[in-house]
């Protein structure tokens, strides 16, 4: 599904557009002109990645032109399909320096898969396939996707190894916020080992300083204009020493 000349949504489950696996996050494809990049390939239950590839082709794009697979954070609804994507596409994999060792080993406890399964979020027989990581991303790094520039920001809080990307060089400026902030200024706190409210507030204050039009979250509504207002709402709640509304 083409959102803009630079951004397509090519996957998403029941908290999105229902165009791939039920538990998949929004799967974004960035079009930088002479190069494509896939962001967070979803959970990767059997057959689901084929649906994502079909969606890319239906948008008139050739998956063989995807050169980069960029992971925002290590939750399984975002990276479960990374190993399959790496196997089937000619991509180099980018993940934060903190996430990389976990992605490489498929460490279930580090990604809170064990508690998420017990809570019923994922099928009991789901396992996280290890995926190679070619590039460890640090704050301030800039990843080029054709004409697009993705500047990385460490945004822990939802989990420790969470990156957001400020995307420039496109038709408009974007914040690829993944699971940082959602429509209406909502956030996603969970009772898992590396969810931290104080870090969450600092991360929201950090991206609040950026200029952007569009907010690309990992789930729910997408804002192509006025996206900053959702960050501002969350920041205002934190500034009152309160907590923004939570998704769950
Ligand atoms: Zn998450």
Image (cartoon, rainbow, N blue to C red):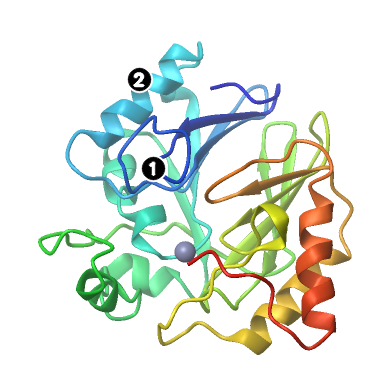
Query: Of the numbered discs in the image, which one, if any, rests on residue 137?
Result: none
Residue at the limit of the structure toward the left, as seen here: 125
Where residue 4 appears, as percent x and y from the top left, is: 70, 24
Q: Is residue 205 left or right of residue 183?
A: right
Report crowding for label 2: few under 14, some 14 to 19, many 20 or more residues within 10 A (C-alpha).
some
As helix, strand or loop, the secondary structure at mark 1 comes to loop
Name the residue that disc number 2 marks: 54
Residue that mark 1 sits on: 14
Residue 94, x across and y down, in percent: 50, 55
Q: Nearer the viewer, residue 239 or 7?
A: 239
Name above or below for residue 152 compared with residue 69.
Answer: below
Among numbered discs 1 and 2, the one appearing first in the sequence:
1
Q: Quadrant of residue 37?
A: top right
Check the image and report above or below for 9 versus 226: above
Q: Residue at x 65, y 41 (%)?
A: 222
* Camera-nearest residue between 161 and 95: 161
Question: Residue 108 at x, y = what percent?
Answer: 25, 74
User: In this view of the protein, which residue sits in the foreground, 162 or 86?
Assistant: 162
């Amino acid at each position: 599904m083409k959102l803009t000349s630079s951004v397509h949504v090519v996957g998403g489950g029941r908290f999105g557009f229902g165009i791939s696996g039920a538990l998949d996050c929004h799967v974004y494809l960035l079009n930088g002109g002479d190069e494509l990049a896939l962001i967070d390939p979803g959970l990767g239950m059997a057959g689901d990645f084929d649906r994502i590839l079909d969606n890319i082709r239906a948008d008139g794009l050739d998956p063989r032109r995807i050169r980069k697979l960029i992971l925002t954070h290590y939750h399984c609804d975002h990276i479960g399909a990374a190993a399959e994507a790496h196997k089937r596409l000619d991509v180099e994999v980018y993940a934060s320096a903190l996430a990389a060792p976990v992605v490489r080993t498929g460490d279930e406890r580090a990604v809170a898969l064990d508690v998420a399964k017990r809570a019923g979020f994922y099928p009991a027989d789901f396992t996280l396939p290890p995926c190679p990581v070619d590039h460890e991303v640090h704050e301030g790094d800039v990843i080029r996707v054709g004409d697009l520039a993705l500047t990385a920001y460490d945004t822990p809080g939802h989990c420790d190894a969470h990156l957001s990307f400020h995307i420039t060089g496109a038709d408009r400026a974007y914040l690829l916020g993944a699971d940082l902030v959602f429509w209406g200024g909502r956030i996603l706190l969970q009772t898992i080992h590396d969810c931290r409210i104080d870090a969450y507030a600092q991360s929201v204050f950090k991206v609040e300083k950026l200029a952007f039009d569009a907010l690309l979250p990992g789930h729910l509504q997408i804002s192509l204009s006025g996206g900053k207002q959702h960050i501002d709402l969350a920041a205002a709640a934190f500034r009152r020493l309160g907590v923004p509304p939570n998704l769950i």
